[in-house]
């Protein structure tokens, strides 16, 4: 019997749990007990994790067969491994580990295509820390003889987190930097890919990303057409007021291929943002996942 545990049950973790509502008990951690109710709504049995092993976590891990890690590293390394490397190594039922990383590990490639064989040359400090964390999880997998699936995610979107929401609340912007493209991934495809890989205990490195790297201003314009509203004006990148983190994203330009994941047999539910926006708009679940009538 399978047992699933998510370290860092945030947006992607909740999508994973919702997609596995018939898989039995799924444990998931959060840093705040205030989020317990939301996690339970997603089908997660919540546990507190603030960087230290607790008796409750220890008990749950003893029954866990599949471990999903979605906690960002910091300057001290991976918080999960720092707190419980030996505990994880000693998990009696463990069959498979997934570590959720980012396509940011590839750095900037001037808009060229990259795949899993491309050398990682991260630009930002946070992406450099991701590379180190990936290696730590792969090393642990080798030491204990368990497959580790490194899932490199592109820009995550879905209900409650998309250009439709941004247009409705007035925060959407169309920044234009010539030649700039980004890949994206719908949260349902993150969940789908993880359940697919877990089903066969498949390890390796996988780009979990869509088929259509596209300029960000095009995504906003497409959402505006669906909503029947005028898109915000284009803003030259040089004139935009951006946080240092937001500006750093535009310092990396690449097209990310997903062929390796497809060769495992996974088929994307939303291979591009257009199909995803069409579906969310038609279903009326683009705001927060609860079906509502589309805004007119």
Image (spheres, helix red, strand yellow):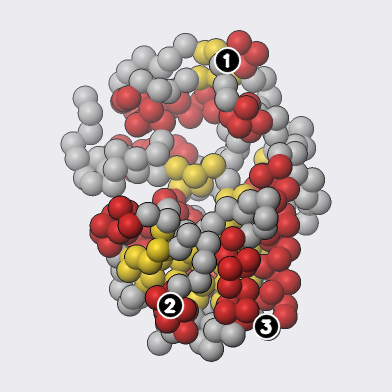
Outermost residue toward the left? 293
Q: CA distance from mark 1 to mark 2?
A: 49 Å
Mark closest to the chain's N terminus, 1 or 3? 3
The residue sitting at 41% across, 58% down in the picture is 30
Residue 120 drawn at (x, y percent): 78, 50
Tag 2 secondary structure:
helix
Q: Nearer the viewer, mark 1 or mark 2?
A: 2
Q: Is residue 193 above or below residue 281?
A: below
Residue 168 drawn at (x, y percent): 31, 25
Q: Which mark is residue 240?
A: 1
Residue 9 drawn at (x, y percent): 42, 59
Tag 3 secondary structure:
helix
Tag 1 secondary structure:
loop
Q: CA distance from mark 3 to mark 2?
A: 23 Å
Q: Which mark is residue 251?
A: none
Mark closest to the chain's N terminus, 1 or 2? 2
In this rendering, the count of numbered labels is 3
Q: CA distance from mark 1 to mark 3?
A: 49 Å
Mark 2 Cα shell of 10 Å, populated few (<14), some (14-19), many (≥20): few
Q: Which mark is residue 144?
A: 3
Q: Is residue 138 above or below residue 64?
A: above
Left or right of residue 155: residue 17: left
Residue 37 drawn at (x, y percent): 26, 57
Tell me the quadrant of the picture where the N terminus can be found: bottom left
Tell me the quadrant of the picture where the C terminus can be found: top left
The residue sitting at 52% across, 23% down in the picture is 217
Residue 118 in view in this figure: yes
In this orientation, which residue lies closer to the viewer: 116 or 68?
A: 68
Q: Which residue is mark 2?
A: 55
Q: Quadrant of residue 158?
A: top left
In this orientation, which residue lies closer to the viewer: 92 or 166?
A: 92
Mark closest to the chain's N terminus, 3 or 2? 2
């Amino acid at each position: 019997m399978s047992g699933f545990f998510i370290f860092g049950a945030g947006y992607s973790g909740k999508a994973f749990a919702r997609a596995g509502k018939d898989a039995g008990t799924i444990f998931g951690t959060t840093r705040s007990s205030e989020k317990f109710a939301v996690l339970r709504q997603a089908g997660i049995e919540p546990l507190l994790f603030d960087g230290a092993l607790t008796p409750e976590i220890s008990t749950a891990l003893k029954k866990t067969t599949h471990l999903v890690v979605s906690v960002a590293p910091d300057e001290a390394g991976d918080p999960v491994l720092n707190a419980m490397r030996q505990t994880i190594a000693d998990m009696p039922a463990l069959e498979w580990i997934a570590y959720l990383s980012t396509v940011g590990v590839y750095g900037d490639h001037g808009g060229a295509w990259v795949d899993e064989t491309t050398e990682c040359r991260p630009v930002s400090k946070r992406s450099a820390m991701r590379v180190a964390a990936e290696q730590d999880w792969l090393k642990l997998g080798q030491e204990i003889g368990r497959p580790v699936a490194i899932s490199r995610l592109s820009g995550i979107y879905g209900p409650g987190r998309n250009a439709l929401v941004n247009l409705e609340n007035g925060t959407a912007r169309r920044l234009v930097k010539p030649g700039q493209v980004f890949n994206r991934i719908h949260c349902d495809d993150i969940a789908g890919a993880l359940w697919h890989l877990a089903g066969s205990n498949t390890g390796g490195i996988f780009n979990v990303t869509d088929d259509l790297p596209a300029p960000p201003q095009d995504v906003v314009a497409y959402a505006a057409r669906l909503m029947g509203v005028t898109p915000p004006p284009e803003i030259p990148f040089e004139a935009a007021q951006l946080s240092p983190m937001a500006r750093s994203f535009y310092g990396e330009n690449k097209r990310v291929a997903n062929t390796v994941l497809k060769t495992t047999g996974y088929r994307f539910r939303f291979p591009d943002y257009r199909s995803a926006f069409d579906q969310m708009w038609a279903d009326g679940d683009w705001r927060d996942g609860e079906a509502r009538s589309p805004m007119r």
